[in-house]
Image: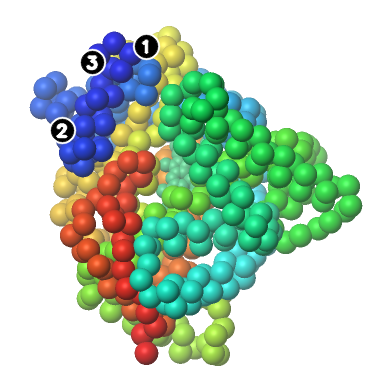
């Protein structure tokens, strides 16, 4: 369990931050205690259980909310909001989730995503080409933030978006820090950022309701959404869930896009195959016509490329839960109540038993391939399965389509290595020369 208070944080940071070999954290425990798939630890200030076998991961993530074995385990619900989907449990979680899923699955949502995202991507790519030398990590982040704010809340003003992005950065800093509410600490700053974001979004919700304003975006779908009993979400529920959606959807997707540019630069034969599919689709369209939902369905190779990028990016190395009952037994181990559980999904995605040659970027592995249950949980599983999974996949595909269509790029430091904190990314942010192809 490690040192008092710090527990095994030193070892965690050593593997993730300094040694930059995050998989050693699990490998060491396997070597010491055998390949049991369940280990005791003390991380992020709490005693915790690490789960890293297909069977235990499946049981924990697949556990029904109603049976009450596992609750949400996010480090701070105060920052996310008490009615945020990531903070709540049981019937309330079910209710909010139903509204979100309905919004994600509505045909309105995909159409409005396709029509509002593509002009943003096209403009961003053109700007990158005029700069020529870019850091892909920074550029994709700015682009996806603009995109998610446009699709979710129709915000366009550059000034407002810049303010919000800096608030989000502050909020994110707090999620990854110790809960110390003293002025000057990251957590205290995050609480202030969260308050400002809430005010901006709450004002938007109230303005729309008071003035009967209707817009084509996700916020509108959530405001209008009615469950089977005729109930709507209240203003705070709408606002807090929009805060969480932006948080959950922006850096995760931009990271995958950065890895997309990185791997495609390193694997020219895969880039060529993707370009070939892009050309075939473009041939059937008039000049500058954007992708439609039908085109997305036909982009088989791009969807395999996106899946492989999401697997290798491992945006969330683990998923948090809390043991919520006294009698929870997994793989023969009794789990102590109130302990955190870290479902270490990363170690499954890079295990040669489940993905051959796992560190190789190989989109073709997804051709008619279904991973064994419990071995592929990039978007989680069960009742908390990421509701934005298709939204993310489509975004990556759209982005790659427009990048392949007119541009070429070259990494400046192809062997820069990977940084793993706070999320895995090329260590130099994927610095590159980005230009028009002809
Ligand atoms: C490549 C991109 C993404 C990855 C890898 C990813 C991954 C995940 C993971 C691992 C979870 C935890 C699931 C669990 O607790 O079992 C999750 C939950 C969630 N994600 Fe995503 N996500 C991505 C994109 C998005 C997007 C684009 C959105 C929204 C616009 C989004 C919204 C959410 C929300 C709201 C939850 C909480 C669901 C719940 O607790 O019921 N995510 N995501």
Rounded to the nearest angstrom, the CA distance separating label 1 from label 3 is 18 Å
Secondary structure beneath dot 3 equals loop
Q: Nearer the viewer, residue 213 or 202?
A: 202
Q: Residue at x 83, y 49 (%)?
A: 207
Measure the C-alpha gap from mark 2 to mark 1.
24 Å
Q: Depth-wise, is mark 1 or mark 3 nearer the camera?
A: 3
Residue 362 percent location from the top left of the image:
23, 63
Tell me the quadrant of the picture where the C terminus can be found. bottom left
Q: Which residue is mark 2?
A: 27
Foreground label between 2 and 1: 2
Vertical relation: 283 (above or below) 388: below
Find out if the beta carbon at label 2 lies less than 8 Å from the nearest ligand 1 atom. Answer: no
Tags 3 and 2 in contact by the CB under 8 Å rule? no
Picture quarter with the N terminus: top left
Look at 11% across and 22% down and name the residue there.
32
Residue annotated with mark 3 = 2
Sequence-wise, the earlier of marks 3 and 2 is: 3
Mark 3 nearby-residue class (10 Å; few <14, some 14–19, many ≥20)? few
Which secondary structure, mark 2?
A: helix
Q: Is residue 192 left or right of residue 13?
A: right
The residue indicated by pointer 1 is 336
Q: Nearer the viewer, residue 94 or 40?
A: 40
Is 342 displayed left or right of 127 in the figure? left
Q: Quadrant of residue 27?
A: top left
């Amino acid at each position: 369990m490690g040192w008092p208070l710090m527990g095994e944080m030193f070892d965690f940071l050593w593997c993730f931050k300094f040694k930059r070999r995050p998989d050693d954290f699990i490998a060491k425990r396997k070597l010491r205690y055998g390949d049991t798939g369940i280990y005791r630890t003390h991380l992020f200030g709490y005693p915790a259980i690490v789960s890293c076998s297909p069977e235990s991961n499946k049981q924990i993530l697949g556990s029904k909310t109603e049976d009450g074995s596992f609750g949400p385990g996010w480090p701070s619900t105060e920052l996310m909001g008490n009615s945020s989907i990531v903070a709540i449990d049981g019937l309330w979680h079910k209710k909010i989730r139903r509204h979100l899923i309905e919004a994600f699955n509505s045909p309105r949502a995909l159409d409005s995503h396709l029509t509002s995202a593509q002009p943003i991507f096209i403009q961003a790519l053109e700007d990158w080409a005029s700069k020529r030398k870019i850091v892909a990590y920074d550029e994709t982040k700015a682009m996806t933030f603009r995109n998610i704010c446009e699709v979710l809340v129709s915000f366009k003003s550059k000034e407002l978006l810049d303010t919000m992005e800096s608030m989000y950065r502050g909020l994110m800093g707090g999620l990854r820090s110790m809960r110390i509410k003293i002025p000057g600490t990251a957590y205290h700053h995050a609480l202030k950022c969260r308050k400002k974001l809430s005010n901006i979004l709450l004002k938007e919700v109230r303005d729309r309701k008071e003035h009967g304003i209707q817009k084509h975006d996700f916020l509108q779908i959530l405001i209008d959404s009615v469950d089977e009993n005729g109930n709507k979400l209240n203003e705070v529920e709408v606002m807090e869930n929009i805060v969480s959606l932006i948080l959950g959807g922006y850096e995760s997707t931009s990271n995958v896009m950065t890895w997309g540019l990185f791997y495609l630069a390193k694997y020219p034969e895969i880039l060529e195959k993707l370009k070939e599919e892009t050309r075939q689709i473009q041939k059937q369209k008039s000049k500058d016509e954007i992708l439609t939902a039908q085109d997305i369905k036909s982009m088989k190779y791009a969807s395999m490329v996106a899946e492989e990028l999401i697997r290798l990016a491992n945006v969330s190395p683990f998923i948090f839960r809390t043991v919520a009952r006294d009698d929870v037994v997994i793989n023969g181990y009794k789990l102590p109540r109130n302990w955190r559980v870290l479902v270490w999904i990363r170690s499954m995605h890079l295990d040669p038993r489940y993905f051959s040659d796992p560190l190789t970027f190989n989109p073709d592995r997804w051709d008619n391939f279904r991973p064994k249950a419990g071995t592929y949980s990039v978007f989680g599983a069960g009742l908390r399965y990421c509701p934005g999974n298709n939204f993310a996949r489509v975004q990556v595909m759209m982005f790659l389509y427009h990048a392949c269509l007119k541009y070429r790029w070259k990494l400046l430091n192809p062997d820069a290595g990977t940084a793993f904190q706070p999320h895995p990314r090329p260590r130099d942010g994927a610095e590159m020369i980005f230009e028009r192809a002809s």
